[in-house]
Image (tube, rainbow, N blue to C red):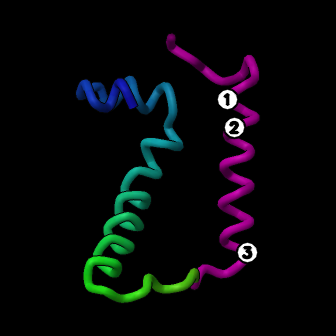
Amino acid sequence: MHQLLHGHVLAAFMLNPLFLLAIPFLLFALLRYSVAVMRGGMPRQNVLPASFIYGLFFVVLSFWIFRNTSLYPFVS
């Protein structure tokens, strides 16, 4: 996050590519939730299939394990 706030997108990607790729989706979810609440309605319930949620969990968990090994190419 520090690298992104200072405008170093490539350095941020080298340090944590999964976070950089997830930012647009996180911002979309935050915006969608905020608009629903500001209009006085209830946000929609989760409509994602369970297989998608489990797949996303597997990707995040795999990345977390991989980046804590000596195989991950850290630059700092």
Q: Position of residue 37 (x, y in %)?
A: 34, 78
The residue type indicated by label 2 comes to Trp
Query: At x 40% / y 29%, what residue is drawn?
Result: 12
**Is 7 displayed left or right of 19 in the figure?**
left
Report if the CB atoms under discs 1 and 2 are less than 8 Å apart: yes
Q: CA distance from mark 1 to mark 2?
A: 5 Å
Q: Residue furthest front?
A: 40
Q: Which mark is residue 51?
A: 3
Question: Which quarter of the picture shows residue 53?
Answer: bottom right
Q: Which residue has dot 2 on it?
A: 64
Q: What is the quadrant of residue 73 in the picture?
A: top right
Residue 72 colored in magenta in the image? yes
Most prominent secondary structure in the magenta stretch?
Answer: helix
State which tag comes first along the sequence, 1 or 3: 3
* Bounds of the magenta segment: 47-76
Q: Residue at x 74, y 44 (%)?
A: 62
Percent coordinates x, y for residue 64 in the rendering:
69, 37
Disc 2: CA contacts within 10 A as few (<14), some (14-19) or many (>=20): few
